[in-house]
């Protein structure tokens, strides 16, 4: 996902799960009935990351 779809406000939603949330959504498939963990890796973060002016939001359950 080199260029994930962004929301109108510039934020990005990424869905994790065994079933697609719908066409055009940023979705990463997981195995049904299996646990998973998320690692967030940034390539070329900007100054805001290092200054701690920006941080990723928490993962939120949708369903």
Image (cartoon, helix red, strand yellow):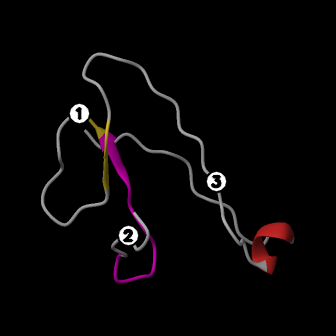
Q: 7 or 39, which is in the foreground?
A: 39
Within 10 Å of disc 1 (Cα), the crowding (few <14, some 14-19, many 20+) is some
Q: Quadrant of residue 17?
A: top left
Q: Which residue is mark 3?
A: 41
Q: Furthest-left residue in view?
A: 23
Residue 16 position, x and y percent, is 34, 42
Considering the numbered disc 2 on the image, is that residue within a helix, a strand or a loop?
Answer: loop
Q: Which residues are magenta?
A: 7-16
Within 10 Å of disc 2 (Cα), the crowding (few <14, some 14-19, many 20+) is few
Give the residue displayed 17% in from the left and 38% down from the top. 19
Q: 37 or 2, which is in the foreground?
A: 2
Comes first in the chain, label 2 or label 3: 2
- Compared with 13, 9 (above or below) is below
Is residue 11 within the magenta segment?
Answer: yes
- In which quadrant of the rendered image does the N terminus lie? bottom left
Determine whether label 2 and label 1 are within 8 Å by CB. Answer: no
Comes first in the chain, label 2 or label 1: 2
Residue 32 position, x and y percent, is 24, 22
Give the residue displayed 28% in from the left and 16% down from the top. 33
Predominant secondary structure, magenta span:
loop
**Alpha-carbon span between mark 2 and mark 3:** 15 Å
Within 10 Å of disc 3 (Cα), the crowding (few <14, some 14-19, many 20+) is few
For residue 32, side relative to residue 6 (left or right): left
Count of numbered circles on the image: 3
The circle drawn on residue 18 is 1
For residue 51, side relative to residue 42 (left or right): right
- Compared with 30, 23 (above or below) is below
**Alpha-carbon span between mark 3 and mark 1:** 22 Å
């Amino acid at each position: 996902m080199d260029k994930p779809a962004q929301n109108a406000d510039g934020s990005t939603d990424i869905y994790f799960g065994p079933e697609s949330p719908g066409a055009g959504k940023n979705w990463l498939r997981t195995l049904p009935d299996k646990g998973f963990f998320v690692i967030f890796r940034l390539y070329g973060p900007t100054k805001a990351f290092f200054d701690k002016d920006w941080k990723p939001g928490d993962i939120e359950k949708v369903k």
